[in-house]
Image: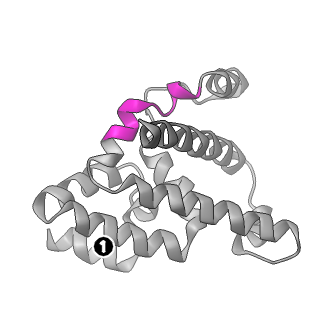
């Protein structure tokens, strides 16, 4: 457990270990507490809300086809292929989804401010292209899908 905490203290686990972070968070929540994982994420996401889609991307359905324009189109038409109830539930098992929801809205607000000339780190990073554009598109789809599921669950 100390190794997980040490790594989490250096940088967000979902950035340094994107593929392993869901299992690391699950281990952490079971070994310590759900609240400890949620608090770690609250600190990392509220400080850098533009990373919230990256966290959600770690919880994507890894069996969904993601290569080529046909795959992207299929996912755009059926976003539940990439992120559905199963993925939401896995995330909610180890962290408070309301924190993710709020961080996504904070990220949106910052992006809107950027439209009006308020600079963000994101605007400086647009020079890096290629596969990152594909990943950013998928992150956006997952973020929108998360919001849909969360809002439906809030109303229930």
51 and 4: which is toward the camera: 51
In the rendered image, residue 110, in percent from the top left (x then y), is placed at 71, 69
- Overall secondary structure of the magenta section: helix
Whether 118 is drawn above or below 50: the answer is below
Task: Please state if 101 lies on the left or on the right of 115 as rendered.
Answer: left
Is 81 magenta? The answer is yes
Task: Please state if 79 lies on the left or on the right of 23 as rendered.
Answer: right
**Residue marked by disc 1:** 7
Identify the residue at horizontal 18%, vertical 55% (top origin): 27
Quarter of the rendering containing residue 7: bottom left
90 and 74: which is toward the camera: 90
**Quadrant containing the C terminus in the rendered view:** top left
In the rendered image, residue 83, in percent from the top left (x then y), is placed at 48, 34
Identify the residue at horizontal 80%, vertical 77% (top origin): 119
Identify the residue at horizontal 32%, vertical 56% (top origin): 95
Quarter of the rendering containing residue 35: bottom left
Is 42 magenta? The answer is no
Which segment did they paint magenta?
79-89
Quarter of the rendering containing residue 29: bottom left
148 and 3: which is toward the camera: 148
Identify the residue at horizontal 62%, vertical 26% (top origin): 75
């Amino acid at each position: 457990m100390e190794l997980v905490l040490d790594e989490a203290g250096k940088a967000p686990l979902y950035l340094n270990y994107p593929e392993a972070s869901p299992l690391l968070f699950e281990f952490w929540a079971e070994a310590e507490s759900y609240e400890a994982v949620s608090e770690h994420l609250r600190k990392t996401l509220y400080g850098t809300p533009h990373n919230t889609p990256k966290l959600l991307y770690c919880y994507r359905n890894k069996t969904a086809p993601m290569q080529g324009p046909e795959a992207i189109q299929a996912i755009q038409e059926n976003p539940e292929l990439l992120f559905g109830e199963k993925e939401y539930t896995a995330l909610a098992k180890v962290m408070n989804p309301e924190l993710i929801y709020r961080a996504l809205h904070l990220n949106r607000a910052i992006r809107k401010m950027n439209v009006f000339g308020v600079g963000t780190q994101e605007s400086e990073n647009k020079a890096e292209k290629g596969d990152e554009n594909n990943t950013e598109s998928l992150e956006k789809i997952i973020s929108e899908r998360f919001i849909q599921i969360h809002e439906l669950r809030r109303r229930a």
